[in-house]
Amino acid sequence: MIRAIRGATTAENTKQSIVSATKELLQEILQANKLEIDQVISILFTATPDLYAAYPAMAARELGMIHASLMCAQEMRVLGSLPYCIRVQATVETKVKQKDLRHIYLKEARALRPDLINK
């Protein structure tokens, strides 16, 4: 089965912070959903316009995701939205039902989906 897992985190606008925060998010997604890297088909990364020091996809490559398709895009600019935010949508191969997947929100991004934090 093909499933999508969502997540988000925040970072400072430095290469180190963007890559580190994205790695932490990806590792949490993999661990929480008991996934191996080869189960990741693709990941769409978005970043708010205030994050431009590095591509979040660099973190996935550094974690060994060399065969998955990775794409980075700029998040829509919306008044009042969370700044310095990196979002991911990972498409994965898993037998887990969609309702049982764990979507991961870290740091200030926890405010985006409080309904999923303790799930």
Image (cartoon, rainbow, N blue to C red):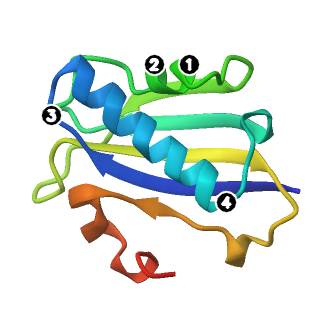
Lower sequence index among marks 4 and 3:
3
Separation (CA) of disc 1 from disc 3? 20 Å
Separation (CA) of disc 3 from disc 2? 16 Å
**What element does badge 3 sit on?**
loop
Q: In the image, what residue type sits under mark 1?
A: Arg
Give residue 118's position: percent from left, percent from top.
Answer: 44, 81
In the image, what residue occupies the spot 80% across and 72% down? 97
In the image, what residue occupies the spot 17% across and 57% down? 81
Q: In the image, what residue type sits under mark 4?
A: Asn
Crowd band around label 4 with a 10 angstrom C-alpha radius: few (<14), some (14–19), many (20+): some
Q: In the image, what residue type sits under mark 3?
A: Glu
**What element does badge 2 sit on?**
helix
Lower sequence index among marks 4 and 1:
4
Quarter of the rendering containing residue 60: top right
Q: Are marks 4 and 3 in contact (CB under 8 Å)?
A: no
| In the image: residue 71, left or right of residue 19 | right
> Camera-side residue: 81 or 63?
63
Q: Do the residues labelled 2 and 1 touch (CB within 8 Å)?
A: yes
Q: Name the residue under label 3.
A: 12
Q: Residue 58 carries which label?
A: 2
Q: Name the residue under label 1.
A: 61
Q: Mark 4 points at which residue?
A: 33
Q: Single out the mark in the foreground, 4 or 3.
A: 4
Crowd band around label 2 with a 10 angstrom C-alpha radius: few (<14), some (14–19), many (20+): some
Give residue 1's position: percent from left, percent from top.
Answer: 89, 57
